[in-house]
Image (cartoon, rainbow, N blue to C red):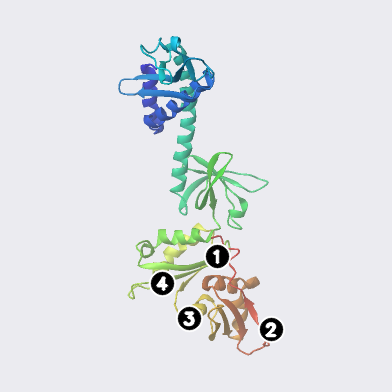
């Protein structure tokens, strides 16, 4: 191997961030395999590459015998004397490959290994880069939107990522050139290429936005205890403060509502209910049904997590919400199955308005 080869390894290390030692190790293995194949399946091959002296040596080991049965791994005494002054039957003899033979094999092996090494290293670097974004918010540029499917191609750090239509906020119209924030929900491998799974409907998008906008959440003074979301329509977020002097709701809303309004703007006008978390299930359920007022909450079964809620007659529809949305979001937020009844008892004992704490539509 000449100086140009070692110079090329150092250049690859500098430009691609691939260790020259890593490539040399792979090249040694590849040369050994190539020699074994070229010389009829010889079993013992030693490859020694010294980057400091910029020299390398390849030898094959054959056993000295009086009669050859396995030509690939055995050698006659007379022939062995070409490589050793005193060959001993039954002992190995070291055979150094000629430069001409070695040059062709080494060049082919090195070329293949370097190409493969670069591909593997680039994939590894890309995987590390993607993993650093997992469960975080990233900003991307909308490159194009497919007219038929509505899927959008988003550029994130010079990589193209597909934002599927069902991961876009309902009612939102994306246009080329828009800069949007997306939540990275997973790193996926397809066709030997790594990619990101991104979403604007994931509930953790809202959670991360609050962490970005509210310093008290970022520093841990205020904690997000629970969140439920129906993307494009409404989000409920339960917050709590370990500092009794800090109002968690006020911190999230901000002066004149500027903090929560920035988040609402980012998620296309989606409504957000900021609710104070309580360890008392009845108090938490009552708050979760906002904007409706609750008269009474009865916990029916703590183990099964079921509760009955009484609301004023004129607020029944508000408590339930359009297509049961408010009640479902409250159930997901609290983890309780909630039966909602009007104060007058118009609905009979066998006909309650209920909702299960089903989180199947929430992406974990």
Secondary structure state at the residue bearing disc 3: helix
Gap in angstroms between the C-alphas marked 2 and 4: 35 Å
Residue 54: x percent and y percent? Answer: 33, 20
Callout 2–callout 4 Cβ contact below 8 Å: no
Mark drawn on residue 240: 4
Secondary structure state at the residue bearing disc 2: loop
Q: Residue at x 58, y 54 (%)?
A: 167
User: Compared to 278, does 266 lie above or below?
Assistant: above
User: Compared to 328, does 259 lie above or below?
Assistant: above
Mark drawn on residue 229: 1
Q: Closest to the observer: 224 or 144?
A: 224
Callout 3–callout 4 Cβ contact below 8 Å: no
Mark drawn on residue 73: none
The residue tagged 3 is: 283
Q: Residue at x 48, y 38 (%)?
A: 123
Camera-nearest label, 2 or 1: 2
Q: Quadrant of the N terminus?
A: top left
């Amino acid at each position: 191997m000449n100086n140009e080869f070692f110079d090329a390894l150092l250049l690859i290390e500098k430009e691609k961030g691939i260790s020259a030692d890593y490539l040399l190790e792979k090249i040694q293995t590849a040369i050994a395999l190539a020699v074994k194949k070229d010389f009829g399946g010889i079993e013992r091959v030693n490859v020694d590459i010294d980057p400091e002296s910029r020299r390398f040596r390849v030898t094959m080991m054959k056993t000295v015998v009086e009669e050859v049965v396995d030509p690939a791994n055995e050698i006659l005494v007379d022939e062995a004397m070409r490589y050793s002054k005193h060959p001993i039957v039954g002992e190995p003899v070291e055979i150094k490959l000629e430069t001409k033979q070695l040059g062709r094999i080494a060049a082919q092996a090195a070329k293949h290994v370097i190409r493969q090494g670069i591909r593997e290293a680039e994939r590894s670097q890309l995987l590390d880069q993607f993993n650093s974004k997992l469960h975080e918010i990233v900003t991307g540029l909308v490159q194009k939107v497919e007219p038929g499917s509505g899927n959008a191609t988003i550029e994130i750090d010079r990589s193209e990522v597909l934002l599927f239509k069902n991961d876009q906020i309902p009612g939102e119209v994306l246009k080329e050139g828009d800069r949007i924030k997306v939540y990275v929900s997973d790193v996926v491998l397809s066709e030997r290429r790594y990619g990101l799974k991104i979403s604007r409907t994931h509930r953790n998008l809202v959670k991360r936005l609050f962490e970005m906008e509210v310093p008290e959440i970022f520093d841990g003074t205020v904690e997000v205890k629970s969140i439920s979301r129906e993307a494009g329509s409404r989000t409920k977020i339960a917050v709590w403060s370990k500092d009794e002097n800090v109002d968690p709701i006020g911190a999230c809303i901000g002066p004149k509502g500027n903090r929560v309004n920035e988040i609402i703007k980012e998620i296309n006008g989606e409504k957000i209910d900021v609710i104070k978390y309580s360890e008392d299930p009845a108090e938490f359920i009552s708050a979760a049904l906002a904007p409706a007022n609750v008269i009474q909450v009865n916990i029916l079964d703590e183990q099964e997590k079921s509760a009955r809620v009484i609301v004023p007659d004129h607020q029944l529809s508000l408590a339930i919400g359009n297509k049961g949305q408010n009640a479902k979001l409250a159930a997901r937020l609290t983890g309780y199955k909630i039966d909602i009844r009007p104060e007058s008892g118009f609905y009979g004992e066998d006909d309650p308005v209920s909702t299960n704490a089903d989180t199947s539509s929430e992406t974990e």
